[in-house]
Image (cartoon, grey):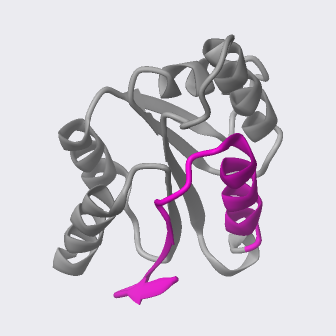
Amino acid sequence: MLKINSFYLLDESYSGSSRAVSKAARTLVGFGPYTKKTVLIVGDMTEQGVKIEDRHLNMGHFLSALPIDYLITVGHYAKYIAQGAALIKTKSKKIISVDNVNELLVTLEEILKPNMAISVKSLGNVVFHRIKSLLEKL
């Protein structure tokens, strides 16, 4: 975890298994009482096998029940996470799906407000450091 200006940035960027994604989400929820908003950024999960779209949909369904303010998905299969999260309608959660890192950074610039907790999951170190650089400039 890094504290950058008024942001908490959780580096969960390495492992992209479904178990690791759910753990990162639950960790982020723990920051809820101490921040104004929480943001979970998640990429394609790395588990191989059949029904990969279903696994991503199921993860989205799981995430929809958590009190996370923004869910941002990045990548082809991660779109299924967004679709799964949208199955349970809620006014408090914003679900955004982008195709690539450049779109992610533009989206972040639009939604970032002071005192947010942001968790980056299964996107790798390069993306994490680009997000970190963005926060340092604010």
Closer to the camera in the image, 128 or 34: 128
Q: Quadrant of the C terminus?
A: bottom left
At horizontal 70% and vertical 14% (from top left) the residue drawn is 54
Residues in magenta, as a range: 1-30
For the image, the number of numbered tags is: 0
Estimate the x, y position of residue 16 in percent, counting from the top left. 56, 47
Estimate the x, y position of residue 137 in percent, counting from the top left. 16, 76
Above or below 15: residue 102: above
At horizontal 69% and vertical 20% (from top left) the residue drawn is 57
Closer to the camera in the image, 24 or 110: 24
Q: For this view, does 67 lie left or right of residue 112?
A: right
Residue 85 part of the magenta segment: no
At horizontal 75% and vertical 48% (from top left) the residue drawn is 19
At horizontal 79% and vertical 47% (from top left) the residue drawn is 66
Residue 29 part of the magenta segment: yes
Q: Quadrant of residue 32?
A: bottom right
- The reply to whether residue 138 is in sight is yes
Above or below 103: residue 117: below
Closer to the camera in the image, 83 or 45: 45
Closer to the camera in the image, 51 or 28: 51
